[in-house]
Amino acid sequence: MGSHITRSRWVPPVPRTWGPGITKHLILLLVLLTLTACHNHQLPQYPPNYREYAYVTNGQSGTVTVLDVVNLRLDREIAVGQNPVAVAASPTRHEVYVVNSGPATGDGSLSVINAENNTVTAAIPLHRRPVAIDIDPTGTLAYVANSGSNSVSVLELKTRREVAQIQTGEDPVALRISPDSKTLVVANHGGNSVTIADLTNLSSLASPVDLRRRPSARSVRSTIDGCPGASDAVILPNSSKAFVACSAGHQVMAIALARQPDVNKPDESNTPTIDRLETLMDVGQGPVQLALKPDGGELFVSNSLSDTISEVVTNKDDVGGAYAMGDDPVRGLVSADNSMLYIANFRSQWVTAYAPEDGRRVSPSIHVGDGPSALAFSSNGFFLFVVDTRSGDIAVARTDTRSLLTLLPAGRAPNAIADKSFKLP
């Protein structure tokens, strides 16, 4: 079971060699491309100055595949650092950030891509084996988990430099900034724990210079133990609670986050609180990833060893039930309107769909490439992009019909994806 659970930190397997079966694969691809051409009139239309790209990290190629979403075609492949494993788009700048885990015994880096011309404009040094990234809502700071250094790097993106470090538990593999930017939650896979850092002093710092002088602004607020193989974290939209998947067991941890008093509300309901473990909820075996509905009402747990998802009602810390999905569910993604959950089943060629309102799996499932492992929507939600690690491609599906539209090539062992859209002046 141990080797299976390591997928919670996502180490892509060696892609399968196609060999003689490639002819059949190419015929299917040509048919799909023909169907795409026949139905272009049904696809979204965009203004001339609109740009949208999907960025896919290729772990064994040291590259990022860039897909042109407007024209549904391969734009280019960009060389980045060694072993890219995570990618995130800036919420405010025309930039995309790629985490390069680096060699087994060396440090990693963060590649900065200018989305307007899709070129690498900077490389920011990191520490040992960085594996995950989150960006604050203003696009000013990036937080990167260094799994080999037991730390989080705080990067000032304008100056392209590390301005602070947060010490964590052993082997941090996932992290999340609260929507109010006051809290950072880190899942420590090897330490079986959760680190919670206080970010409340950030808003009072006048400049990046002050930021460097006051590293205590990112002090560790609390550490909560008892989450075997902590692998993923989500935070509710109101920043009141965090949930962490414990992938080496069969539980999800619910944590009530500390609340600071509001000076504008001097009443009894405004008393400060501390970070507190609310409960450990039993789910399926090997819960590796959490998918939160945009409205925060429910989250869905991908139980990789049980071939199920568990549905959690977040305000009650109640597990509503478990539902069979496919072979080795590893990633879930909920549509913006909260109506549909998509699940990537790694040991298959299928993405399954689940309707939260009906509480059931729905048809059709989407037939994609081999080893679906990561998911992303286009900005308008019309397309679902599926990263197929084993076959080394990206499936593009329509969400209105839940049907495969086309397959586009990626590099070796693709493992993560981010979508970025913007308008040129």
Image (cartoon, rainbow, N blue to C red):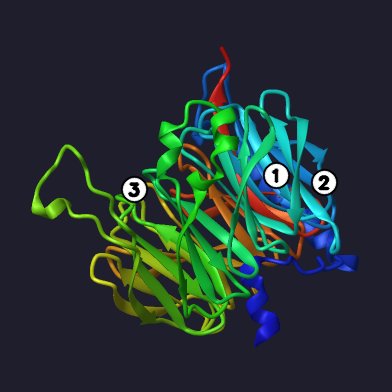
Residue 196 at what x, y percent from top left?
A: 46, 60
Would you call the spot at circle 2 few (<14 residues within 10 Å), some (14-19), or many (20 or more)? Answer: many
* Gap in angstroms between the C-alphas marked 2 and 1: 9 Å
Q: Residue at x 39, y 45 (%)?
A: 179
Q: Secondary structure at mark 2?
A: loop
Q: Secondary structure at mark 3?
A: loop
Quadrant assignment for the C terminus? top right
What amino acid type is highlighted by mark number 2? Gly
What amino acid type is highlighted by mark number 1? Val
- Residue contact at pointers 2 and 1, CB within 8 angstroms: yes
> Which disc is residue 81 wearing?
2
Residue indicated by mark 1: 98
Q: Residue at x 70, y 37 (%)?
A: 73
Looking at the picture, does residue 249 appear above or below residue 325?
below
Residue 125 at what x, y percent from top left?
A: 77, 43
Q: Nearer the viewer, mark 2 or mark 3?
A: 2
